[in-house]
Image: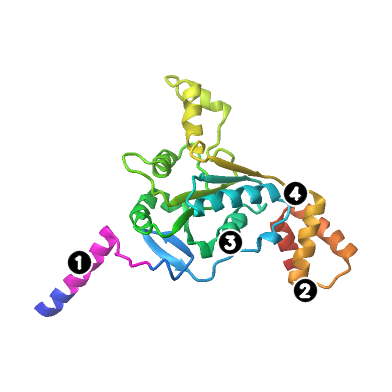
């Protein structure tokens, strides 16, 4: 290999290593997009953002009203809370977050989705968020929970509450989870460590959920609400079927799936 070729190869390797170790500097133009994905320290715009009109989200009126009110305050520069939406699967938690945020996209609100595997890198976003004070940012973490043996929740507490640094004023966290407290709390925790009081262990686990001033529960919906959603999706997908038969098949499908929720309603319509 000649000297020039060797130098070219070494230069490319050095550039690749610099990019890996320091992260590629990005020039994000927040005036061009509304939604972003943060993954492996890269912030990428989302061009085909998935949301539903708020009027189509049935059976969660209270949750919708509270999240809208909190987001409205945040967009207006007023004090607002980090929010956790917890509860039954398929009840519209993630859809509500996305749809509420979309409502305010013309008010300077941006949504950044972060996967669980990247949550400990969130602090790397703080500088770019701080430098773009003309916009308000929601960091969205979907389906978050921790197992008892996972210790990342301790670091995550400091990320969303700050340590020696201050969380950007134009940032909130919206999180969804199937678990009310994000971390399972079991009676067996009493016996894990004889030197630690049970109350201390409990406080340690509950301290994460304390970072969320708005906590909204989602529950399995009733039959009538489920059937209304079925009718809504049937109209959207132009399913032509007598209503009584549609309801009968929809309830049969729900029994087989073991749940009454919006996700099951959509899956039923797609199965026809």
Mark in front: 3 vs 2: 3
The image position of residue 53, as x and y in percent, is 66, 63
Q: Residues within 10 Å of mark 2 (few under 14, many from 20)?
A: few
Quadrant of the frame with the C terminus: bottom right
Tag 2 residue: 238
Upstream in sequence: badge 4 or badge 3: 3
The stretch of residues the image draws in magenta is 9-28
Which mark is drawn over residue 14? 1
Q: What's the distance in space between the residues labelled 4 and 3, CA to CA?
A: 24 Å
- Would you say residue 143 is visible in this rendering? no
Q: Residues within 10 Å of mark 3 (few under 14, many from 20)?
A: some
Tag 4 residue: 221
Mark in front: 1 vs 2: 2
As for residue 187 lying within the magenta part, the answer is: no
Residues at discs 4 and 3 in contact (Cβ within 8 Å): no
Residues at discs 1 and 2 in contact (Cβ within 8 Å): no
């Amino acid at each position: 290999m000649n000297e020039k070729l060797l130098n070219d190869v070494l230069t490319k390797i050095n550039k690749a290593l610099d990019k890996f170790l320091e992260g590629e500097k990005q020039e994000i133009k927040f005036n061009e997009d509304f939604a972003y994905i943060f993954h492996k320290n890269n912030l990428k715009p989302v061009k085909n953002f998935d949301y539903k009109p708020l009027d189509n989200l049935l059976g969660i009126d209270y949750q919708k009203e509270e999240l809208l009110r909190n987001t409205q305050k945040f967009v207006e520069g007023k004090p607002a809370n980090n929010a956790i939406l917890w509860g039954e699967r398929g009840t519209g938690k993630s859809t509500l977050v996305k749809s509420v945020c979309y409502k305010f996209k013309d008010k300077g609100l941006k949504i950044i989705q972060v996967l669980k595997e990247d949550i400990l890198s969130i602090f790397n976003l703080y500088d770019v968020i701080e430098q773009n004070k003309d916009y308000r940012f929601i960091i969205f973490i979907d389906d978050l929970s921790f197992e008892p043996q996972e210790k990342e929740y301790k670091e995550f507490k400091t990320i969303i509450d700050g340590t020696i640094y201050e969380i950007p004023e134009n940032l909130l966290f919206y999180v969804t989870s199937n678990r009310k407290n994000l971390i399972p709390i079991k009676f067996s925790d009493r016996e894990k460590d004889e030197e630690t009081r049970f109350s201390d262990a409990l406080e340690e686990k509950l301290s994460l959920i304390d970072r969320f001033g708005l906590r909204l529960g989602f529950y399995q919906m009733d039959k009538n609400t489920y059937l209304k959603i079925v009718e809504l999706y049937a109209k959207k997908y132009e399913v032509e079927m007598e209503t009584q038969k549609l309801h009968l098949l929809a309830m049969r499908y729900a029994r087989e799936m073991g749940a009454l929720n919006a996700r099951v309603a959509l899956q039923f319509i797609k199965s026809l």
